Image (cartoon, rainbow, N blue to C red):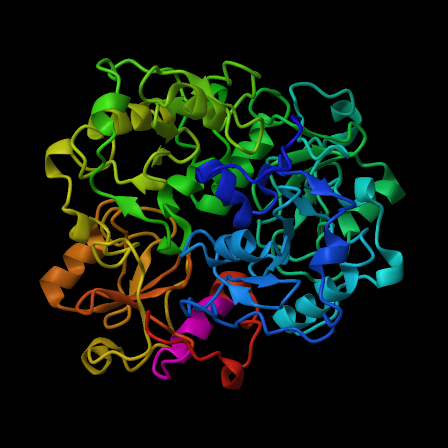
Amino acid sequence: MATYSSKLPENGPEDEDEMMIGGELGWVRHLASCDHLVASLSSDLARIPTPDTPCNMCKHPRGNWLCLCCKEVLCSRYVNKHMLRHYREKNHSVALDYSDLSVWCFACHAYLNAQPILQLRPVHETSYVLKFGRALPFNTGQHPKVKEDDEMMLGAESGSVRHLTSCDHLVASLSTDLARIPNPDTPCNRCQHPRGNWLCLCCKEVLCSRYVNKHMLQHYQETNHSVALGYSDLSVWCFACHAYLNAQAILQLRPVHETSYVLKFGETLPFNTGQHPEVKEDDEMMLGAESGWVRHLTSCDHLVASLSTDLARIPNPDTPCNRCQHPRGNWLCLCCKEVLCSRYVNKHMLRHYREKNHSVALGYSDLSVWCFACDAYLNAQPILQLRPVHETSYVLKFGRALPFNTGQHPKVKEDDEMMFGAESGWVRHLTSCDHLIASLSSDLARIPNPDTPCNRCQNPSENWLCLCCKEVLCSRFVNKHMLQHFRETNHSVALSYSDLSVWCFTCDAYLNAEVILQLRPVYETAYILKFGEAPPFHIGEHPKVEDQ
């Protein structure tokens, strides 16, 4: 694990993603101490704004950050970078993310572990109560040690995840009947936590993670059953090795990994077992830029100088970083075709840009394209120079062609309707819509399950529900059947089973289902069907959100 500089680096996808993604994959450091807390913490953090407070500058409605010095609420780099600007103007170093309650220090350029840092515990617990309406599931006097606390997510104390290709504990820790396992939505056997639990691969008991009540960890300590599979991302963890196991390379784990994939997504893995990408990476291809707040440019002045003339032949997506041999989720420089790791590892692609001024890179994790010089993502579909390499990388990653022909790439506005809103790429969330009367069924108390396949192409998951006729159809990421349905029937309003957002095709915008009374019931019904519990807020407590 490389040592991070204490200086905030220049903007880039790898720098500023730290503000939003949290400790994804465990490569982010979580410090247990910070020298900037004395100067950066308010003396009155017992009273803080609620997590649904909009950005004080641009009124972005959710997922904002709280400055722990002045208690100002500001948006992340995915919107207008107001918290980053606030740090640069005020030197207020420490902020809490209302999205996942992580704490970030700009001066340290690292996350802070709010559990072992005494000064941060109170505000972390206060924000948890405000966000979830209940106290943390463990008392402050019982905060686990960093190593124990991070076992399920971060691997060793350093925070770097290891993925072993062998494990001496499998013989004693694997059931002989893993062809039949509980469904991924099985609640914890002890506390009934509804989702994101772990499956013991020895006795097949389903128990919650360390983020809830640590029942899987307790189970291991009681029974010495070492190996568990996470139903959240289908990763496999060995407590005895204190490391993740690579289910792709370990023959004994492949069957249960593939069985769990089928149960979770309703389809077999779309590639050979010898070439499995991680499930989470595969999902990123379907979801695109989370929440749609990321800019996707449709032109870039740096392409002429930054694209190789031979992008028909590129390295495989599983090529390790050329410098540190990090095995996956790396970036491809589209100028020299060097494969280098992201900011989650050793920042080698960022360093490469600074050394060579090669501006444009493709992320093998989600096949997004980033321009360092523009400080923005590039939309590889309408940009003619990027289409070939985007399609080649898709074929290499998934073993099949893109689900639409290159000659039929949609225009930006049409292509982005399901995810990004208007052509600018910025999502609008309207609080009223004139098309609801004609577009809502009178019987939305009964709707299809979120795992219903597309009625036309049988795409298995994360489709859209027409709120007029209740037909379930796939998104523009597959075969655009919901878009076609709108054009054929003029049914304007649809709900996404991926993130439960609501889109109006006629308005060309998202609708805020929390504040629009006609949409609340179907939103809450869909939430219960998807997660097995009611939304964590009461109808009367829905925050007001201005039109964006």
Q: Give the farthest residue toward the bottom.
A: 540
The answer to whether residue 290 is above or below residue 204 is below
Q: Is residue 90 above or below residue 267?
A: below
Q: Quadrant of the N terminus?
A: top right
The reply, left or right, for residue 53 in relation to residue 243 is left
| Position of residue 517 in the picture relative to residue 275 (left or right) | left
Specify whether residue 118 is in view. Answer: yes
Work out whether residue 189 can be spotted. no
Magenta-tinted stretch: 515-528
Image spot of residue 537 (x, y percent): 56, 76
Q: Residue at x 32, y 25 (%)?
A: 393
Dominant secondary structure (helix, strand or loop) of the stretch shown in magenta: helix
Say which of 69 and 425 sits in front. 69
The residue sitting at 75% across, 32% down in the picture is 156
Towards the viewer: 250 or 283: 283
The residue lying at 33 percent from left, 24 percent from top is 399
User: How many numbered tags mark residues here?
Assistant: 0
Q: Position of residue 67 (x, y in %)?
A: 61, 62
In magenta segment, residue 523: yes
Q: Is residue 186 left or right of residue 33?
A: left
Tell me if 329 is positioned left or right of 51 in this view: left
Q: Quadrant of residue 44?
A: bottom right
Please identify the quarter of the rendering in which residue 423 is found: bottom left
Q: Check the picture and name the quadrant holding the C terminus.
A: bottom left
How far across and how far down the image is residue 90, in percent? 57, 57
Please state which of residues 19 and 440 is positioned toward the viewer in this rendering.
19
Relative vertical location of residue 259 with respect to residue 355 in this rendering, above or below: below
Q: Nearer the viewer, residue 453 or 287?
A: 287
Residue 147 image position (x, y, % from top left)? 81, 39
